[in-house]
Image: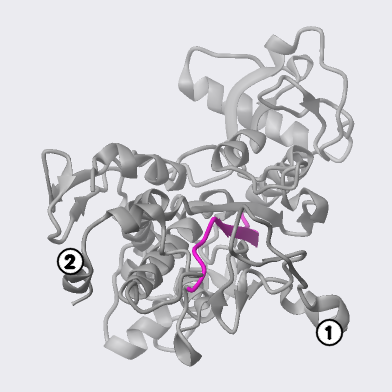
Amino acid sequence: MELSEADIQPQLTRRRPGQSKLTTPRDEKDTVTIMSGCERGVTLGTPIALFVPNENVRPGDYKEMAKVPRPGHADYTYQCKYGTRASSGGGRSSARETIGRVAAGAIAEKWLRQQFKTEVTAFVSAIGSVEMPEESACHPSGRVWTRQEIDDQGKLVILRNPITGWKKCEDAAEQKQVDAKYEDHFLDEKTDAAEPAYMDINMVVYDRKGNVVDSPANVKDWNSGDLLHVRCPHTPSACEMSSVVRTVKADSDSIGGVVRGVCSNMPIGLGEPCFDKLPALMAHAMMSLPATKGFEFGSGFGGTVLRGSQHNDMFEAHGEETQFLRTKTNHAGGTLGGISNGHDFTYKVAIKPVSTIGRLQETATFDGKQSSLEAKGRHDPCVLPRTPPLLEAMAALVLADLALIQMTRADTTPPLCSFASEKQKEGGSSKKRARVAE
């Protein structure tokens, strides 16, 4: 397969720290280099090694945590299990560990797209108590949001009122002070809630609650240049989510939320009976990510209040254009008996608030003495805007594994299986496929 750093870098860039004021100020470029497994831009079939250096590190920020385990973090359990732990950041219990998943997932995703035109996308659907409308979970046309639309619709510029004294400064230190002063103004309860706060890529202006407001005549003077990547395709909700995160950040606290994922154009037949069902492996993959607290697919817990006559997805007779049955609805979330049925696989993942916060917390030391902890360092007040690439990567890895398993049955499965594509019919003998399977 053709492969270069350009296939992997976009997802690492969407995940990287330092993207905006809604995330950690730690500025890592996360530039990837392919070390092995490729030659002249083509994979060799040997293991692919990827290198992404850490360039913006401050291990001294974790000095306070040498004797005090962070509440809500894995410091304590790692110390108990292994008798030691990574002192800087948490090591394998740190979200930094996910960079390898995202890099590998980008490769799996390219293979899925080439083989089956499968697309994996994810977007922020809730932060704190702010949840995007259910009807906005899909594009207005009814199709799945594209990754580009998710990024564009959830991209905002912070507007700051020049009347309050905000201005653009040439000196970076002075600009930081001016911005901080305005944040105090923004969070002040006396500030007019209808004051312009954000502008989207179409130059539409919103207040802090996501209501459309009149654009100031001198909107260029309001433009701070601070770009927020929320990754929520419903722009009004993205505005309100941004306001929540800014408030939480000012309190030296953190907030969680929910990410939705969709896998579309999936082949029929992915998933194995009993223990390796598609949703079971997806749950395993998603819950292996740091900070995840819940997983549901299809109708999820909401489906428990429906009757069977409401929840059953009725089949439609296929026309001449396809030999596959379709369902009118998708409460099942793209699977039947744990095996993909050709519909979109839809799911949600709950993400908890970040454990490491700068707020004073009363806790205890490792040796059982009462203590307090006020963490230093550069940590996300909310990881949700950086989370979609993680879910997309894990989904792609699961689907690629299951697709390869199903491909070993290419000579025995009935013609209804979508793996009997024109590309496969043209691509080599059964002996060649058997060698690949072996």
Query: Gap in Å between the C-alphas at discs 2 and 1?
Result: 45 Å
Question: Horizontal placement of 429 versus 40: left or right?
Answer: right
Identify the disc placed on residue 432.
2
Helix, strand or loop status at disc 2:
helix
The magenta stretch is 252-269
Residue 201 appears in the picture as rendered? yes
Q: Amino acid at mark 1?
A: Gly
Mark 2 crowd level (few <14, some 14–19, many ≥20, 10 Å Cα):
few
Give the farthest residue toward the front. Answer: 320
Question: Horizontal placement of 315 versus 109: left or right?
Answer: right
Instruction: Please name whichever residue, 227 or 343, is drawn nearer the observer in this view of the structure.
Output: 343
Image coordinates of residue 188 in percent, x first then y, are 81, 38
User: Reading the chain from its start, which is encountered first: label 2 or label 1?
Assistant: 1
Q: Amino acid at mark 2?
A: Lys
Give the farthest residue toward the top. Answer: 218
Helix, strand or loop status at disc 1:
helix
Q: Which residue is mark 1?
A: 308
Residue 344 falls inside the magenta stretch: no
Residue 381 appears in the picture as rendered? no
